[in-house]
Amino acid sequence: MRLTVIGCGYLGATHAACMAELGHEVLGMDTDSDRIACLNRGKAPFFEQGLDDLLATHTATGRLRFTDSYTEAADFAELHFLGVGTPQLPGEGAYDLSQLFAAVRQLVPRLNGPAVIVGKSTVPVGTAALLTALVRELSPAGDRVEVAWNPEFLRESCAIEDTLCPDRLVMGFFAERTWAESMLRQVFAEIIEAGTPTIVTDLATAELVKSAANAFLATKISFINGVAEICDLVGADIRRLAEALGHDDRIGIRGLRPGLGFGGGCLPKDVRGFMARAGELGAEGMLSFLREVDAINSRCRERMVDLAREQCGGVIRGKRITIWGAAFKPGTDDIRDSPALAVAQRLHENGAEVVVSDPMALDNARKAHPELHYIDDPIAAVDGADLLLHLTEWAVFADIDPRRLAMHAAALKVIDGRGALDADRWSAAGWVYRALGLPSLPDDREQVSRRG
Ligand code: UGA
C-alpha cells in the first residue's frame, strides 16, 4: 500500500520505517527540513536501537522517502498517519494540539479525493471528533475523507519491536465497517494475521485507551514508590516487597520496579494531560487520583536529594557528587523530563559540584544543562567523588567493578536509584550502599521487629 506519515519525530520516523519494513510504499512528511535531510540520508536524528538500519535499508530501495511538502504528501496516497508531537503546554497540564490541527489544516485542503486520516499522536479524548468536523469543513471530498484513531504503544529503546510485534492493535472509527477500517486492516494485515489481538472501537474509546494505558503504567510505578516511602519509615525492604507482589498474576512484576520514578516524553506529560482533561470533563475523582500519582513521582526526586544530603553528612554545598545517568531510561539518548538530570540540577542548585556520566545522552544533557560537569568515562567521573548516585540503569554501570572504583572515590558512598547494582558486591567492596525504600543497616530491621 501507499501511505504517508505526517510528523517524523520519534513516533513518526519509527512508524514510517516500520511501515516500509512491512512492505508498504511510504512517504514521511515533516516541516523541519534538516530532519528530512537527515532521514533521507538513512539516519535518525535521535538514537533508537535498529532504526538507522531500517532507514538505510528502505531509503536505499526508494520504498521510504521523506519530504517537507504537504502537496507531495497529499498527492502520494489515500492513507495518511498523523504522528506529530502533542507536547505539554508550558506552565499547564494540558496538551498543545497546535501541531496536530496545523497538519490537518495544511493537508486536507490539498487532498484531491477520498482519503483516510489516521491519528496516532496521544491526545485528550474528544480530539478525533473535533478533527472530524474540521476535516469535513476543509475537505474538497467532504465526508469521503474519514478520520480514524490508532494509538501507538511503543516504548523508546524497543520501538521497532513494539511497532512490528505489538501486544495489541487498537483502531477507533466513527462508525462500524467503514472504508477506513478496511484500509487499516490491510496496512496491518501481517500483524493481524500473526494473531495480534485487534480491538475495534469508536473514536473516543481508542483515544482513551492510550491515556488510560499510560496513566495505569504511571500509577503502578507511583504505587510501588509510595509503598517505598512507608518502607523507609519502618525499615522494610521495597525490593523484596515488590518481588512478592509481582508473583500475583493479577499484579505482575513488570513495571513495578521501585526507584526514582518515571520520566521521559510520555508518562509525565500523559498523566498531566489526562488530569487536565478529567478536570475539563468534571471527573473530579480521577483528577485527584492522578494528581497524587504525579505528586508521588515528584517526591521520589525530592527524597533522592534528601538521601544524598543525609549521605553527605547534612551538607550538600561544596561536595563533589557523581551521577551515573542522564537519559530518562537506558537504551536512549532522550533526556526529556529525565529524573536523573532533575536530581543533578537540584544538587547543583544546593551548591554541589555535580559530575554526570552517561553512555549516550551526554550531548543532549550538555545542551540542556550547561551548568553541570560531564565526563564520558564513568570511572574517571568518580575521581574525588564524595558520593555516587546511580540514577539511570545502563548495563555498563552495573558491570563496573566496585573494588576498582573504590580507588577513585574520595568517600565510598553510593545511592542506587534504580536498584540495578549488586548491593552485596558493593558492600563487600567497602561501599556504604543506600537506596530509597531499603533499610540502611541489617540491624535496622531487627530493631523495628523487636519494637514490634
Ligand atoms: C511509555 C509507555 O511504556 C509506552 O507504552 C508508550 O507507548 C509510551 O510511553 C508513549 O506514550 O509513547 P516510554 O516513555 O518509552 O514508554 O518508557 P517506559 O519504558 O514506560 O518508562 C517510563 C519511565 O518509567 C522511565 O523513566 C523508567 O525508568 C520508569 N520506570 C519504568 C520505572 O521507574 N519503573 C518501572 O517499573 C518501569
Image (cartoon, helix red, strand yellow):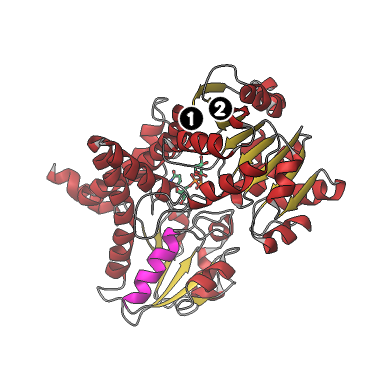
2 and 130: which is toward the camera: 130
> Could you tell me which residue is drawn at 55 percent across and 65 percent down?
358
Q: Is residue 245 above or below residue 364?
A: above
Within 10 Å of disc 1 (Cα), the crowding (few <14, some 14-19, many 20+) is many
**Residue 349 bears which disc, if any?**
none
Q: Outermost residue, bottom direction? A: 318
Q: Amino acid at mark 1?
A: Ala
Which residue in the protein does label 2 denote? 171
Label 1 to label 2: alpha-carbon separation:
6 Å
Q: Amino acid at mark 2?
A: Met
> Could you tell me which residue is drawn at 63 percent across and 39 percent down?
81
Q: Report helix, strand or loop for mark 1.
A: helix
Upstream in the sequence, badge 1 or badge 2? Answer: 2
Cβ at disc 1 under 8 Å from ligand 1: no
Q: Outermost residue, top direction? A: 177
Please check the rendered image and state whether residue 370 is part of the magenta-colored stretch, yes or no: no
412 and 86: which is toward the camera: 86
On the picture, is 112 further left or further right than 347?
right
Please check the rendered image and state whether residue 347 is part of the magenta-colored stretch, yes or no: yes
On the picture, is 78 further left or further right than 382?
right
| Residue 263 in picture, x, y percent from top left | 44, 53
369 and 344: which is toward the camera: 369
Badges 1 and 2: C-beta atoms under 8 Å apart? yes
On the picture, is 402 further left or further right than 293?
right
- Quadrant where the C terminus sits is top left
Magenta region:
338-350
Q: Report helix, strand or loop for mark 2.
A: strand
| Residue 318 in picture, x, y percent from top left | 34, 83
Which residue in the protein does label 1 denote? 206
